Image (cartoon, rainbow, N blue to C red):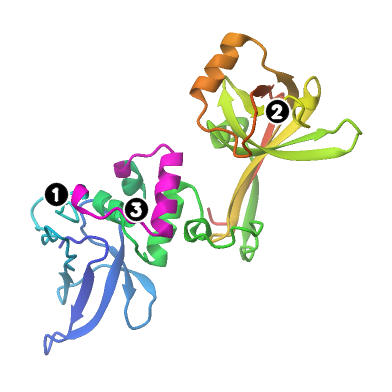
């Protein structure tokens, strides 16, 4: 037995052969489409792990295209594409969720195949989600959010103007300190973080910036007359975090060290040339700042059994 995400699992009555229960397959545990499956039952809308018995079979749902339809998945070959229509034949009209999935995938530097593998789904199914208006199930969104390092709420676009962390706390949370190497991994290569410093009038200031990691230094661009630029020659703190509202867990990393302006022309040229993104705030922000951490600490909240 082999299945794709979105196929229907039908359980029949042994006596009459009539459908006794059916549900949508929303999660695969093996890349070749073999059991077990995560099934969202149509009668309860609950998602359960199912090992199909002899009274169950897969109904491969057809998806019509202008040129071709999906072929049933054979039992004796590797997983085929979910849709046989070429991508050029599909109308590129993604919905909001598809756009967010595509943006997050590219932001993480993941290919379509790698992202699909992490989310345990067919690459063509992921391509369909990115290219067509769709309403994936909660189970599918949870897998995608985990694979892309984001949250279900972020993929849905909910709470864009609300601060993160408004979900309920875990019943049995575990708070643990992170080793410096894990902190470096979480900082990764680029993203959005916050610089904490003292302004010229002595008051504390926290400024969000688009940052990069280059040779173990945290670098970011700012305007020459900005508050962030005035921190040159002083010790600052830099914080980056990730909060998963859907799972009520997350992590934070804090780096402390001296800030300086990058003045060497060749270094500035390389930073500008290889930057992953331009500052979201826009404007003339061509002054590169560097923070060399002398202290790197972090914490992570997970369920107690993890």
User: On the picture, is 287 further left or further right than 86?
Assistant: right
Q: Which is more toward the observer, 256 or 226? A: 226
Q: CA distance from mark 2 to mark 3?
A: 36 Å
Task: Give the percent coordinates (x, y) of residue 300.
Answer: 62, 47
Can you identify the residue that label 3 sits on?
130
Magenta region, main secondary structure:
helix
In the picture, the quarter occupied by the N terminus is: bottom left
Q: Residue visible at 29% across and 43% down?
A: 113
User: On the picture, is 177 further left or further right than 75?
Assistant: right
Q: Residue visible at 41% across and 44% down?
A: 105
Can you identify the residue that label 1 sits on?
78
- Residue 134 numbered mark, or none: none
Q: Secondary structure at mark 1?
A: loop
Can you identify the residue that label 2 sits on?
223
Magenta residues? 88-113
Task: Give the percent coordinates (x, y) of residue 250.
Answer: 59, 50
- Quadrant for residue 63, please give it: bottom left
Q: Residue visible at 41% across and 41% down?
A: 106
Specify which label sits upstream in the sequence, 2 or 1. Answer: 1
Specify which label sits upstream in the sequence, 3 or 1. Answer: 1
């Amino acid at each position: 037995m082999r299945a794709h995400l979105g196929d229907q699992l039908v359980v029949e009555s042994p006596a009459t052969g009539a459908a006794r229960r059916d549900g949508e397959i929303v999660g695969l545990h093996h890349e070749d489409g073999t059991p077990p499956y995560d099934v969202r039952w149509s009668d309860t809308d609950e998602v359960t792990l199912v090992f199909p018995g002899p009274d169950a079979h897969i109904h491969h749902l057809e998806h019509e295209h202008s040129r071709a339809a999906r072929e049933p998945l054979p039992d004796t070959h590797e997983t085929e594409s979910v849709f046989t229509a070429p991508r050029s034949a599909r109308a590129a009209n993604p919905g909001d969720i598809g756009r967010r999935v595509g943006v997050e995938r590219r932001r993480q530097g993941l290919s379509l195949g790698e992202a699909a593998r992490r989310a345990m789904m067919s690459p063509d199914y992921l391509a369909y989600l990115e290219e067509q208006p769709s309403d994936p199930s909660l189970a599918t969104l949870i897998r995608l959010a985990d694979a892309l390092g984001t949250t279900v709420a972020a993929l849905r676009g909910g709470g864009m103007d609300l601060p993160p962390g408004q979900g309920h706390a875990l019943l049995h949370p575990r708070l643990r300190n992170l080793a410096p190497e894990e902190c470096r991994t979480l900082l990764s290569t680029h993203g959005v973080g916050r610089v904490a410093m003292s302004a010229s009038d002595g008051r504390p200031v926290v400024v969000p910036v688009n940052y990069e990691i280059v040779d173990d230094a945290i670098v970011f661009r700012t305007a020459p007359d900005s508050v962030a630029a005035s921190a040159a020659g002083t010790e600052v703190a830099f914080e980056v975090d990730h909060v998963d509202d859907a799972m009520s867990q997350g992590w934070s990393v804090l780096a402390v060290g001296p800030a300086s302006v990058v003045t060497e022309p060749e270094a500035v040229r390389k930073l500008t040339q290889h930057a992953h993104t331009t500052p979201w705030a826009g404007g003339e922000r061509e002054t590169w700042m560097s923070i060399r951490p002398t202290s790197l600490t972090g914490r992570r909240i997970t369920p107690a059994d993890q």
